[in-house]
């Protein structure tokens, strides 16, 4: 009997300990719970950031942080896409073939650790971004092409040399991928740019990271001595809010609910079906265009099933893009009229190539010799017309898009299957055209180079134009057209080269664009002055919060 | 339990840990793609396959699987959990950040679940009015069928967004625990209540209950002194097993409520194929699971005199 009593007492004691543990944390919570003083902006992110190495800022959660803590040499006006001075005191001097750039650096700019931002530091930044550092596992920036080296001519003049024309360099130094960081920060390794180190990443931006809760929260404080906003910006000096609380909320309904119920000020990635909730008074939506290659399908013509242009044409004619966009998305996702978004540099309208016409699709397939088999899937020479699509995990509703495509193509005798798997598996699979024949993707970058970034054989190579196993290029003409965009020095020439490449992509039926992808933010009307940079990353410098 | 039996039981526990580790390692290596791919393979970075291979070499990920396996075991035995491939943070720092939060959530949820289960079982067995007993008896099947994430989202929608009682953002640590622990409590309480209810039913059929009643015991005396202790054993076994549910539930709960914890850490590590983190989580989860079940086993003879007797008879024979 005694032992039984003991066990009950032990259980009661355990409960008591658990309860006191709970009440102890209550007390601690109340003390720190009063952090909501002044106007601190609460911003909700769907994903955790994974590195603050600026060239890796392409991942939206990274870019959303970098944009608050770093400045760039040049400023790209989000509306006009024009480059303007920022940390560079004026636009750079460029030689005729765009292989030498000279920047005058603004004087008096300091990093948040007090060190000066001078020519030597700028050179150190771009040497790292342009060349990478294998020992530190830091890759080369995708935005910088043909980089050779930089030189500090004097304290406030930096000169950069390229092995071949690099007309995109001016735009490249305006992106988050070229966010300037202090000398000490540049010495860090890839791991030291990762989570857990956020407060040690030192930029010259209007906000400073002061606290980090691993995987869930970042706290930013306003830098009071900040005084080097882009000259064209109306508001100068320090930011008008006390700081930012960046909170990770992966569940979409939670992000939507916290903003609509007034617990948070702004949230990124509002799913299309939830957009209607922001039509209520006191709330609004900002759909920021990403101004690059549209969300769409890339047909890998090097694969035997897709090497016939008529098959590619038939697939395009068989897909009803309007139905997909109408069913799954909202007005924030305009139907694509070309490979590039309307706001992208170099945009050309190729919408005539994407007309929905199932009759034509059937005719093309019949003529190409694909006959319906016993199960309805077309066959030719013992091969089934069965294609595998990837699931673009970072893109909105990719699985649903592919499912609709599957439904639309099935009656035509084209079988579509979806490759499911986590990001690592997807990244591995898309490398091989035998695994993924149709690649669903997009990329945002406000420069002519974006088309090359996406499709060129030595860049993302989304069409698998280069078979990395054999080293063979399937369509040399396409590669030449793309390379042209990044090697002609003037804007007019680049515009023409980009248009030629888009026309060729449309004629050859290599790409089917679906819609212009937007970054959709839901916000409370208390938040005024919210803007995004040229491809949709949030900028909180101009924000004010009404009480 | 003799010393020999205890040692055997401990040996089993260690074997389970080793097997869990090996299975996790083999499965993670067999999957296509790896952590390097997950971190650097994203087309956003635009790295060529050659550059990826170079990074792989610099991380030692190009070595044969068996060597990496031995390396990681050796490091583990030295208490070195390595570094997260995805974030570069040390795994022990990640665990130190996540573990206390999950333990707090899990223990509150478990205590709450036991309380809820006992309340349900007692009300269903001895509640006033047949309709009440019948209604409460139907609660466990209902609770079991509710998905954890759904409970979480409904609770947030109602109590935080609609009624504004508990903030999701900027909540104090205590406030931040209320909804997640209720979310986690419900699916754990359900099977516990069911098992407890069933064994109360069984114990009440036993002849000794009639004897005790005949001697003038009240219902509550009967319940607390005779029925409950005898019905406790199966429920305790169940509670040990429910730890698995607790971990699984925590993954969903922490994701829904945006809490830092082992669950959220696991979910992220899975999405990013972060092998060192996953291995550490598997080993810790297995260790806790094994320990809890070991304790439950050791508690049996303490709680049930019959097990002590059997044992002593066995020794005598």
Image (spheres, rainbow, N blue to C red):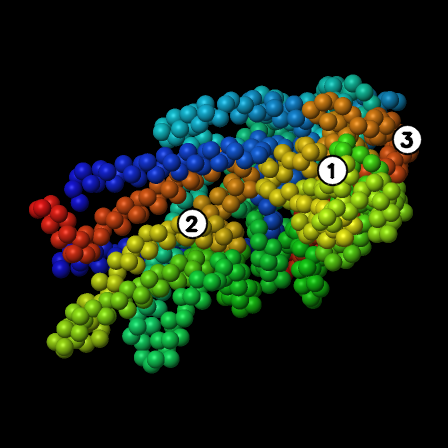
Which residue: 43% across, 25% down?
B71
Residue picked out by circle 2: B247
Q: Residues within 10 Å of mark 3 (few under 14, many from 20)?
A: some
Residue A72 located left or right of residue A244: right
| Gap in angstroms between the C-alphas marked 3 and 1 | 47 Å
Q: Is residue B89 above or below residue B74?
A: below
Residue A66: x percent and y percent?
A: 64, 39
Residue picked out by circle 1: A382
Q: Is residue B291 above or below residue B307?
A: above
Among numbered discs 3 and 1, the one appearing first in the sequence: 1
Q: Residue A332 is drawn in which quadrant? A: bottom right
Residue A367: x percent and y percent?
A: 87, 42
Q: Tell me the SS state at disc 1.
A: loop
| Gap in angstroms between the C-alphas marked 2 and 1 | 49 Å
| Gap in angstroms between the C-alphas marked 2 and 3 | 59 Å
Residue extending farthest front: A374
Of marks 3 and 1, the one in the foreground: 1
């Amino acid at each position: 009997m005694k032992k039984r009593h003991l066990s009950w007492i032990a259980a009661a004691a355990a409960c008591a300990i658990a309860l006191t543990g709970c009440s102890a944390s209550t007390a601690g919570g109340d003390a720190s719970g009063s952090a909501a003083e002044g106007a601190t902006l609460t911003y909700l992110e769907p994903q955790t950031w994974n590195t603050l190495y600026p060239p890796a800022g392409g991942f939206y959660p990274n870019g959303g942080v970098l944009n608050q803590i770093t400045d760039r040499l040049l400023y790209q006006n989000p509306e006009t896409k024009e480059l303007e001075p920022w940390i560079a005191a004026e636009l750079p001097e460029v030689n005729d073939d765009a292989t030498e750039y000279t920047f005058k650096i603004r004087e008096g700019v300091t990093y948040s650790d007090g060190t000066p931002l001078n020519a030597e530091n700028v050179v150190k930044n771009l040497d790292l971004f342009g060349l990478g550092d294998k020992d530190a596992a830091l890759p080369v920036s995708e935005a910088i092409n043909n980089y050779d080296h930089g030189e500090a001519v004097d304290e406030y003049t930096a000169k950069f040399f390229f092995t071949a024309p690099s007309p995109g360099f001016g735009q490249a130094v305006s992106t988050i991928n070229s966010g300037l960081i202090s000398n000490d920060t540049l010495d860090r390794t890839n791991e030291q740019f990762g989570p857990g180190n956020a407060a040690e990443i030192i930029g010259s931006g209007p906000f400073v990271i002061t606290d980090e809760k691993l995987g869930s929260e970042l706290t930013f404080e306003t830098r009071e001595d900040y005084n080097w906003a882009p000259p064209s910006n109306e508001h100068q000096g320090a930011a008008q809010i006390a700081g930012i609380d960046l909170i990770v909320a992966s569940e979409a309904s939670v992000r939507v609910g916290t903003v609509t119920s007034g617990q948070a000020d702004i949230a990124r990635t509002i799913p299309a079906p939830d957009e209607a909730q922001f039509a209520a008074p006191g709330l609004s939506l900002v759909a920021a265009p990403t101004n690059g290659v549209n969300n769409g399908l890339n047909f890998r013509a090097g694969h035997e099933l897709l090497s016939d242009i008529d098959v590619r044409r038939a697939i395009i004619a068989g897909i009803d893009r309007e139905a997909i966009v109408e069913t799954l998305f909202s007005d924030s996702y305009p139907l694509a009229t070309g490979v590039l978004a309307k706001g992208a540099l170099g945009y050309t309208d190729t919408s005539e190539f994407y007309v929905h016409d199932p009759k034509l699709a059937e005719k093309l397939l019949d003529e190409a010799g694909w006959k319906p088999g016993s199960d309805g899937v077309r066959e030719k020479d013992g091969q089934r017309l069965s294609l595998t699509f990837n699931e673009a995990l970072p893109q909105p509703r990719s699985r649903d898009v592919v499912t609709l495509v599957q439904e639309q193509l099935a009656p035509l005798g084209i079988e579509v299957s979806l490759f499911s798997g986590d990001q690592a598996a997807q990244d591995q699979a898309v490398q091989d055209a035998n695994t993924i024949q149709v690649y669903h993707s997009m990329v945002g970058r406000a420069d002519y180079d974006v088309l090359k970034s996406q499709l060129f054989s030595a860049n993302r190579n989304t069409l698998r134009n280069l078979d990395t196993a054999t080293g063979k290029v399937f369509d040399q003409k396409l590669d030449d057209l793309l390379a042209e965009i990044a090697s002609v020095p003037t804007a007019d020439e680049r515009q023409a080269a980009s248009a030629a490449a888009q026309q060729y992509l449309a004629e050859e039926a290599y790409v089917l664009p679906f819609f212009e992808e937007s970054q959709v933010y839901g916000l409370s009307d208390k938040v005024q002055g919210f803007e995004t940079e040229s491809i949709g990353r949030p900028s909180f410098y101009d924000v004010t919060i009404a009480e | 339990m003799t010393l020999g039996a205890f040692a055997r039981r401990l040996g089993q526990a260690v074997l389970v840990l080793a097997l869990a580790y090996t299975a996790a390692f083999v499965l993670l290596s067999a999957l296509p793609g790896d952590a390097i791919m997950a971190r650097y393979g994203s087309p956003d970075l635009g790295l060529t396959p050659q550059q990826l291979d170079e990074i792989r070499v610099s991380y030692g990920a190009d070595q044969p699987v068996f060597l990496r396996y031995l390396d990681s075991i050796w490091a583990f035995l030295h208490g070195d959990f390595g570094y997260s491939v995805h974030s570069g943070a040390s795994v022990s720092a990640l665990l130190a950040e996540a573990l206390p939060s999950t333990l707090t959530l899990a223990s509150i949820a478990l205590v709450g679940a036991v309380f809820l289960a006992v309340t349900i079982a007692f009300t269903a067995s001895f509640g006033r009015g047949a309709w009440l007993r019948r209604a409460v008896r139907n609660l466990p099947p209902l609770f079991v069928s509710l998905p954890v994430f759904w409970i979480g989202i409904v609770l947030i929608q109602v109590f935080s967004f609609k009624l504004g009682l508990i903030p999701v953002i900027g909540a104090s640590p205590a406030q931040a625990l209320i909804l997640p622990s209720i979310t986690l409590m419900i699916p754990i309480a359900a099977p516990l209540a069911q098992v407890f209810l069933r064994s109360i039913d069984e114990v009440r059929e036993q002849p000794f209950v009639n004897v005790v009643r005949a001697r003038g015991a009240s219902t509550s005396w009967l319940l607390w002194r005779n029925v409950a202790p005898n019905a406790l054993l199966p429920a305790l076994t169940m509670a040990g097993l429910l730890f698995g549910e607790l971990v699984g539930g925590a993954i969903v709960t922490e994701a829904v409520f945006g809490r830092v914890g082992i669950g959220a850490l696991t979910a992220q590590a899975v999405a990013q194929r972060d092998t060192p983190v996953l291995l550490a989580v598997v080993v810790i989860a297995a260790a806790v699971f094994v320990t809890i079940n070991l304790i439950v086993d050791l508690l049996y003879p303490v709680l049930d005199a019959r097990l002590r007797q059997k044992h002593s008879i066995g020794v005598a024979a």
